[in-house]
Amino acid sequence: MTASITCPDCGRTSYNPNDVREGYCGHCHAWTSTVVPDDEYVRQNAAGGWLLSDKAVADIQEASR
């Protein structure tokens, strides 16, 4: 499973790990929201979307090796 973020404004999805981590839309050139950490694996942004944390992404990548 690849982490992704979908912009609530333009609807485009990014699989870039930096965009996912930062909540950034490369198409709009803007941050989609303020990301608030919830726990070590999942965090929710202000728009209500859920993002995988860096630890979750690293664990998924490690498990797929």
Image (spheres, grey):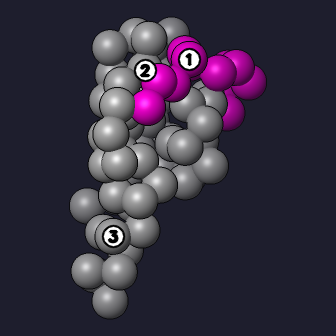
- Asked if residue 11 shows in the view, the reply is no
Sort mark 1 into few (<14), some (14-19) or many (20+) by Cα contacts within 10 Å: few
Quick one: label 2 or label 3, which is nearer the N terminus?
2
Residue 61 occupies which quadrant of the picture? bottom left
Q: Which mark is residue 34?
A: 1
Quick one: label 2 or label 1, which is nearer the N terminus?
1
Examine the rendered structure and indicate whether residue 34 appears above or below residue 41.
above
- Asked if residue 33 shows in the view, the reply is yes
Quick one: label 3 or label 1, which is nearer the N terminus?
1
Q: Give the residue at x 55% y 16%.
A: 33
Q: State how far apart marks 2 and 3 are (Cα).
A: 21 Å
Residue 46 in percent (x, y) is at 44, 11
Circle 2 sits in a helix, a strand or a loop, which is it? Answer: strand
Circle 3 sits in a helix, a strand or a loop, which is it? Answer: helix
Looking at the picture, tell me which residue is in the foreground, 10 or 33.
Answer: 33
Please state the extent of the stretch shown in magenta in the rendering. Answer: 26-37
Toward the right, the furthest residue is 29
Residue 22 occupies which quadrant of the picture? top right
Circle 1 sits in a helix, a strand or a loop, which is it? Answer: loop
Examine the rendered structure and indicate whether residue 62 appears above or below residue 19.
below
**Cβ–Cβ under 8 Å for marks 2 and 1:** yes
User: Mark 3 = which residue?
Assistant: 59
Q: State how far apart marks 3 and 1 are (Cα).
A: 24 Å
**Cβ–Cβ under 8 Å for marks 2 and 3:** no
Q: Give the residue at x 67% y 33%.
A: 26
User: Mark 2 = which residue?
Assistant: 45
Residue 50 in percent (x, y) is at 31, 30
Report the amino acid beneath label 2.
Answer: Asn
Residue 43 occupies which quadrant of the picture? top left
In the image: residue 4, left or right of residue 31: left
Report the amino acid beneath label 3.
Answer: Asp
